[in-house]
Amino acid sequence: MTAAPRPSSLPSTHASSSAASQLPPAFPARAPWGTAGKLRAWQAQAIEQYRLSDPRDFLAVATPGAGKTTFALRIATELLEAKRVRRVTVVAPTEHLKRQWADAAARVGITLDPNFSNAQGRHGHGFDGVAVTYAQVASKPALHAARTAAAPTLVILDEVHHGGDALSWGDAVREAFGGATRRLALTGTPFRSDTAAIPFVRYDRGNDGIRRSVADYTYGYGDALRDHVVRPVIFLSYSGSMRWRTKAGDEMSAQLGEPLTKDITAQAWRTALDPNGEWIPSVLAAADRRLTEVRRAIPDAGAMVIATDQTDARAYAGHLARITGKSPTIVLSDDDGASDRIDEFSAGDSRWLVAVRMVSEGVDVPRLAVGVYATSTATPLFFAQAVGRFVRARRRGETASVFLPSVPQLLGLAHTLELERDHALDRPKTLEEQGVDVGLDDGALDEANRERNSPDEIGPDGKQGAFEALEAQASFDRVLFDGGEFGTGAEMGSDEELDFLGLPGLLDVDQVSVLLRQRQAEQISGRKKTAEPVAEMDHRKQAELRKELSQLVGAWARKSGQPHGAVHNELRRRCGGPEVALADPDQLSARVAMVRGWFVGKR
């Protein structure tokens, strides 16, 4: 719902700083515990700093969920009341965020037109300004420069790092708003990993010669956690056995999470995310069990899957429909219909939302408490934005649970969630740039993404080849929380896994740590008590049986048209035992015998 223009007789000073101070700090959500009806301490401090410095440019870095919108609108109302500016322009990353800003601004008497188009040339009668996207600005910077010059204007640059998305975008933002009376830049996450300069951000050179961004006010995740403004995050990581066929036709296998080269890790990760394997439905089922536990204490708690592309998102939604018996909300693109679906989900109490990228940044759905990170994007910026969707606290004791593939890059990002980083314009050569292989990097994952969404390449034999995921089995790996790791690995559905999935939904940080340590100690103690001598396996025989089973499954898959993963799953169901990588020779022999029987009609 967009804000309606007020009568033209009302001056722009109708904006109310008093109303802005009463706006719930995490508008449009219900205010978090202990914060309703007043500014948070960090907002008050940042506003006071702004008043004292009286700057033309101001950069505020505040963690997702901290209340940047409320802070910015309080600044806007004060500048309008003092007649320091007459117009307000908000620049946001997405169409949905334009609407969100307009709705929030209307609450404090500032009317922004989120439907403004470049074709209009100027905003509608009775509005104080407009809400536009970075893409709109980039397409016609001269138009926005003329609008900005027509009256003293405050420009709010939401998630300002998008101004560096491309050289042309940065140049367009500078051209459009170089003449603005005031510019207020906001961001909630670590800055970009590249070296594209962000418009209107100050950079200072350090002792190491590297220029880094300088924020005028910073309020990090660690600060917000101590103030009970955000939820602590419990990361649950899942590994498993992966098999795939490369474009060259080679069949590969690996255990997700084990030390691997960056290329093998990327391919194993891609295999895990394949919707036709068993990794994704197993992890989604585990996440749904976690959501059920959380909803015992938070009845309207919701969960979200962040997918790599639209095809995967639809397939994941199908898995969730089968797991829960209800179709989840799907958000696939940045259009009006998507915004309506987000709003409907946010206001309701349904369980699951499946999205690609647009809900990963800035969008407020405070009831989201469980997430599944099912994308191969691994930049610190995207990861922090995605996790930020789950950390908005509404009352004390809420926790967030995020399910991850056991990939070194993601586990590293989870460990460093509380670190604040400034944007570096210059940087020394990385180890990889020096020719040292240090494992997974963003470039390898970007390449994996490009492969997924591009035409198949020509193989060495002159025929068209394609990457093919053959098998993806999931197993519980560990829990990451507050800098520590808990759990020693377990089968899906085991008591060990359920110990962690069943953590209460309302716990303080200290209580979470105590419970995690207690459950890990119980698991270790229990394993010692039940451990029995195991005969040493003949690893050669085991390897031969795995190879024979793989060949037979491949042949049956071609004959029956079933996916490889489905054949393996049926064999495992009927013969028992763990996934292939963990099965002993007797279990492998039973599966070989069964699939051989299928070829002679014993099915």
Image: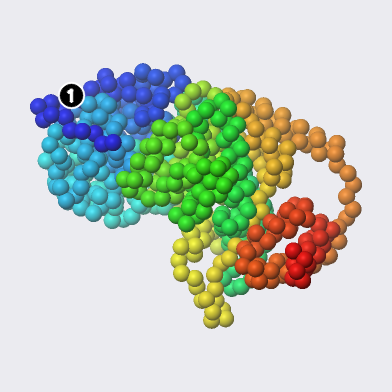
Residue 491 position (above or below residue 449)? above
Nearest to the observer: residue 592 or residue 250: 592
Is residue 508 visible from the viewing direction of this image? yes
Residue 589 position (above or below residue 573)? below
Q: Position of residue 478 (x, y in %)?
A: 66, 41
Quadrant location of the C terminus in the rendered image: bottom right
Quadrant location of the N terminus in the rendered image: top left
User: Residue at position x 47%, y 28% from top?
Assistant: 393
Residue 602 position (above or below residue 587)? below
Q: Position of residue 261 (x, y in %)?
A: 62, 60
Nearest to the observer: residue 319 or residue 27: 319
Within-10-Å neighbours for mark 1: few <14, some 14–19, many 20+: some
Mark 1 — residue? 14
User: Residue at position x 44%, y 46% from top?
Assistant: 330
Q: Position of residue 130 (x, y in %)?
A: 21, 39
Residue sticking out furthest to the bottom: 462
User: Residue at position x 69%, y 34% from top?
Assistant: 499
User: Residue at position x 14%, y 33% from top?
Assistant: 126
